[in-house]
Image (cartoon, coloured by chain):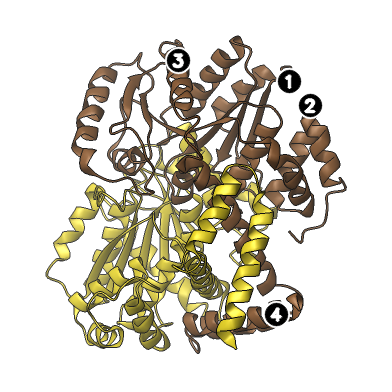
Chain colours: A brown, B yellow
Amino acid sequence: MTAPADGGNGSRLAEEARAGSRRALARLLTAIESRTAVAEEALRALYPDAGGAHIVGVTGPPGGGKSTLVAALVAVARAAGRPVAVLAIDPSSPVTGGAILGDRIRMQDYAGDRDVFIRSMASRGHLGGLAGTTATSAAVLDACGFGLVFIETVGTGQSEVEVASIADTTVVVQAPDMGDEIQALKAGLLEVADLVVVNKADRPGADRAAAQLRAMLTLGDSVEGPDDRPRPKRPEVSLASALTGAGVPELLATLDRAQAARTGHGPPAARLARARAQVEGILADRTREALWSSQRRAETDALMGRVAAHELDPYAAAEQLLEQLRGGSQSRVE
Amino acid sequence: MTAPADGGNGSRLAEEARAGSRRALARLLTAIESRTAVAEEALRALYPDAGGAHIVGVTGPPGGGKSTLVAALVAVARAAGRPVAVLAIDPSSPVTGGAILGDRIRMQDYAGDRDVFIRSMASRGHLGGLAGTTATSAAVLDACGFGLVFIETVGTGQSEVEVASIADTTVVVQAPDMGDEIQALKAGLLEVADLVVVNKADRPGADRAAAQLRAMLTLGDSVEGPDDRPRPKRPEVSLASALTGAGVPELLATLDRAQAARTGHGPPAARLARARAQVEGILADRTREALWSSQRRAETDALMGRVAAHELDPYAAAEQLLEQLRGGSQSRVE
């Protein structure tokens, strides 16, 4: 958190965001992405008020229609008067600003609705980890009164699957007809699924795709989840059509039931995963800051150069850096 | 590196792998993925001998035909008698073993060829970071005499793009006809490209796709790369057909030229990126090990539980953990 403040005081920004300023909220989320001191101050102020929202991960291979399904879920939630936020993890570039995915543009239907907040986040450039930044952003939205937060991510990368795993409930979306490589991508995703939705159910083959999925999931019954996360023995497979709206209210009701079933049983695994992602992200930031601080930068650069030249192996370099960090922190502590 | 040794002594395994045992090499790569003490010992032994190989990243959206193109490049390299290795980053699950992508199976044509080594690596489960594990694996292949190492990865996630960025030369592969969402994924990838290949050039629309890409890349000329990596002002766009073999020998020749142009100018940015990925991965491992060691586990768990319950904010927790780690390391150092 060494980046300069963005001109706003963190706790003031937090107060304004909590009081309903969408501009303050937007600035705060930018500060979190840039990992500034403002973000730290604001999060410290807001964190005690978070914890009540239902964080729903929506993921799946490209082309499954995740964005349209999220838009349809937002419409149903808004019709019921519920404030709802969307964090859309954009796989495109943080450098060029990236391409906005077509479907997200439809979200601008809600431009005048203060109870809908939509935010695109670049998937790259999160040094302390995308999962940590996403968890922190979700906590801020939660503290600002959004009881339902969707995290939408293209489920094809390691980080993206990690993001799905910090959600309270993870929905994996797929279309009936997808290519071979995409079928393979799917296998890894099904393990993090609490619910599987065959979207575009208006198309031919949807019932068959759902039946195949159910068969596949039955085969996987004996497999343990990767994160010891308790989950239903077998994720429910349902059909929906974001286009016609069929199945969407039922999906939201299923999500609500899943969350309601959890309360009163202590912090569940997803909350712990969020806590870990955030804390480990901060620790990684602090280590990186120490390594590349103005005092140590030259020394770190020299060591990395020796590793790059294969004069020193990475373990030896890591040990030297740890010695230096310990020395440095001792003098800071004492 | 607290996982138990896999029964082999690291330096003996390293010696056997360097002497040509493919079985030892395979076991070594497994040890690197599991981050055992054997891997550490072996890497320390092999690292000084690495540094000569050309590490080529091959990435792109799903469906572009990366695997077939890599197979075609391997065929051309083998026809010239060059030893060649492939690290295929498999987006599917580390838990179920995952689905092998169809095209990779064709690689088994080389089952009897000792100078071809093909390895699938799960993209998930690399705690210290996929880029670090991949860089370490590439260094081991390099030390074992593979002068050309392809890293194949589906370029749709943050980690996968990071992996591409540790390669000496990064080739982005795409097919002429791809959907909208995939077009958006592409934008982020083009920034890491040294070369862009329109594969499946036997299909209609390939010339038009190449022309569009060239136009897109011209627009991007003023954009800085994300990692200060010096690269050609504009990546070359070429056509190839893994199916007919057209353009593949030319592509390998272009790759060779790109690498030859680099020697004698000190460690280039990609080598530094590999060094950083490995060292930072080891530091992250050490921090995580310290946090979850048997002595500290209960305390760390309790802190994470308080963060999960929103009784403590993540920054306060990170600070308490840093204090503990410093205390612990002081007593270890003294």
Q: CA distance from mark 4 to mark 2?
A: 43 Å
Mark 4 or mark 1: name the one nearer the start of the chain.
1
The quarter of the picture where residue B223 lies is bottom right
Label 2 marks a residue whose chain is A
Residue bearing mark 4: A330
The reply to whether label 3 and label 4 mark residues of one chain is yes
Label 3 marks a residue whose chain is A
Mark 1 or mark 3: name the one nearer the start of the chain.
1
| Side (left or right) of A131 relative to B139 | right
Element type where label 3 sits in the image:
helix
Residue bearing mark 3: A248
Around disc 1, counting alpha carbons within 10 Å, would you say few (fewer than 14), some (14 to 19), or many (20 or more)? few
Asked if marks 2 and 1 touch (Cβ < 8 Å), the reply is yes
Around disc 2, counting alpha carbons within 10 Å, would you say few (fewer than 14), some (14 to 19), or many (20 or more)? some
Residue bearing mark 2: A20
Q: CA distance from mark 1 to mark 3?
A: 23 Å
Callout in the foreground (2, 3): 2
Q: CA distance from mark 4 to mark 1?
A: 49 Å
